[in-house]
Amino acid sequence: MDVLWGWGMIAIGLVVAAFGTRFVRLGIALIGFCVGFLLVFAIMGDQGSVQSVLISIAAGAVGAILCLALFKYVAYLAGAALGVAVALLLTSAIGMSQGGAVTQTLSIVIAIAAAIGGGIIGPMMGRNAMLLAASGLGAIMMVAGLNQMYASKLGGTETSQLLAGSVNVTLFIILFLLSCLGQVDFKGFGRERA
C-alpha cells in the first residue's frame, strides 16, 4: 500500500513542479492541495497507515477548494504556500540538527508564522512567489512520496522531518532546481533587442 500512496504523491508533486506556473488555476489548486496534504501528513503520527493518508488527502482537498475560492488573492496565496514550504524545510533542518523530531506544536507554530510572513511578501515577489512555491512544494511532495516507498533506504523515518537525511536533502535540491528551470520562461532569452 505504501508504494501506491508514494506513487500518487510523486505524481501530484510532478504535476505541481512542472505546471504550477503554466496553468495558474490548476497550479494554485494543486499548491493548496500540497499545503494541506503535507502539513497534515507531517503532523500525523504514523505515515504508513491508510487512515493518516486519507485524512491528509481530505486536508489537501480542503486546501485546494479554499485556494480556488480565494483565487483573486493568488499573490498572497502563493506567498503563503512558499512560506509553508520554507516552514517544512525549517522544521526538517531543526529536527536534523537536534538529532530528533520537532514537536507538533513547534511545527504548527512555524508553519503558521511562515505562511503569514509569506502571504505578506508574496505580492512583492510577484510571479516569482508562484514559481518558488510550486517548485518547492512539488519537490517536497516528490521526496515525501519517495520516502513513503523507500523510507528505510532514504533515511526519512520521522513524520515531522520530510527531508530528514542527506539523501533526501540532495533529492530535494535537485528536484527544486530542475523544477525552477523547467518553469522559467525563456522565450526572449538570447534575442537581441532593437
Image: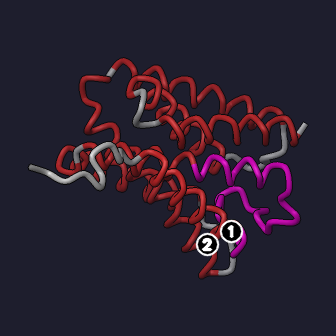
Residue 161 forms part of the magenta stretch: yes
Q: Is residue 30 left or right of residue 168?
A: left
Placement of 49 over or under 181, stated as above or below: above
x 79%, y 42%: residue: 6
Residue at mark 2: 95
Front in this rendered view, residue 30 or 66: 30
Q: Alpha-carbon distance for marks 1 and 2? A: 8 Å
* Discs 1/2, front: 1
Q: Main secondary structure of the magenta part?
A: helix
- x and y, in percent, of residue 135 in the image: 48, 49
| Magenta residues (range) | 139-167
Lower position in the chain sequence, tag 1 or tag 2: 2
Give the amino acid type for the residue marked by disc 1 in the picture. Ala
Front in this rendered view, residue 54 or 29: 29
Mark 2 closeness class: few <14, some 14–19, many ≥20 residues within 10 Å? some
Residue 162 forms part of the magenta stretch: yes
Placement of 61 over or under 56, stated as above or below: above
Residue at mark 1: 164
Do tag 1 and tag 2 residues touch (Cβ < 8 Å)? yes
- x and y, in percent, of residue 58 in the image: 63, 25
